[in-house]
Amino acid sequence: MRKVFLSIAAAAAVTSCAYAADQSTIILDLSKSTTELTFNTENGSWTGTYDDDAESIESQCFSFLHSSMADWQTWWGFTASNSTDNKQPENTLTHQWSNMAAGGILLNEDGTVKLDDFGAPVVGKDMPYLVAFYSPFMSARPVDMVFNDGKLYDPQSVYVNLNSYSFYSILLGDGFARAFTNDDAFTLTIHGVAGDESEKTVEVSMASCANGDLTAAKGWKYVDLTPLGTVNELYFTLTTTDTGAYGANTPLYFCLDKLAVTPAEGSAAGMMAADQASISYDRASKTISVDGADFAAVYDSLGAKVFQSDDSAFSITSLPAGVYVVKAGNSSIKIVR
């Protein structure tokens, strides 16, 4: 009989205690979202998932990018859910709104992650969390997170979880995917992008099969992000060994909660090099500020230059809502207008 092993990182308890002493750490809490998050009472999905005007989910310093085509009932990037149903339903597509931990992670009163006696995060009923769908045909970075203040941050950690649709396809197979067998793997890669567009990555095994046994991230899995260093953007990719003529057969979903970052200012590791420009973005006033460069250029999501200025601060209120890249000197940031 094939066994399924639960994968949880025990380091969570140690790291969460460190956060209590560091008040500068920002931990994702979707109850603080400035994006209106209302949920379908039947399946837990965010009611804005197919809203073509919804460009992102905003919470604290985080912008989780979201895209959709309402006419085709298609979405990619990030959406939100409060589903607690991780059972196998008859309609497998309902799995795309749920995770195998059956809910989002609770926080303590001091804002730190709540852990049980075994060091695992405590899951709360109806606690919202993020669901990500990686659709590489739609964009070079379809699952993307940027900081809505245009500042640099040092990622500390994040919790990830198998989406139910992916889990049951890996375990049992479906009309497109086969059940995992020996040497199969489902891997999440987290990319940290610095101001000069250089990248560092952290790989996370979401599921793998060896000796006839499946190891899967059914609970919320702690991931150390400190190897990424100082970044202004995170994006996420998924790979599977079950592929065909049209790419991945395994549904390319995962779930995310309680991303933790600290501001880069004040730490030697977070300071920009002298030859790099400093770029910041005030989303409230739609103003970009630049220091250390003669001019800045703004590019749309297709790479076309849509604005340029040699002022130290300039407004982009004339641009339509969307995702843009601002470049100045050797630095760049991605913003959501």
Image: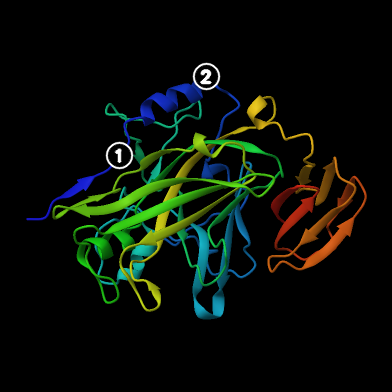
Residue 282's image quarter? Answer: top right
Residue topped by disc 2: 21
Q: How is the image coloured?
A: rainbow
Residue 229's image quarter? Answer: top right
Q: Which class describes the residues within 10 Å of circle 1: few (<14), some (14-19), or many (20+)?
A: many
- Image quarter where the C terminus lies is bottom right
- Residue 241 location (% of width, % of height): 31, 63
Residue 173's image quarter? Answer: bottom left
Q: Residue furthest left?
A: 1
Seen in the picture, residue 206 relative to 242 is either above or below; the reply is: above
Seen in the picture, residue 243 relative to 188 is either above or below; the reply is: below
The alpha-carbon separation of the residues under discs 1 and 2 comes to: 24 Å
Question: For the point 50% across and 59% down, which residue is it?
Answer: 79
Q: Is residue 310 left or right of residue 54?
A: right
- Image quarter where the N terminus lies is bottom left
Q: Amino acid at mark 1?
A: Ile
Checking the image for residue 266, the label placed there is none
Q: Is residue 283 left or right of residue 186?
A: right
Checking the image for residue 8, the label placed there is 1
Q: Nearer the viewer, residue 126 or 176?
A: 176
Q: Nearer the viewer, residue 65 or 285?
A: 65
Q: Amino acid at mark 2?
A: Ala
- Residue 37 location (% of width, % of height): 54, 54
Q: Secondary structure at mark 2?
A: helix
Front label number (1 vs 2): 1
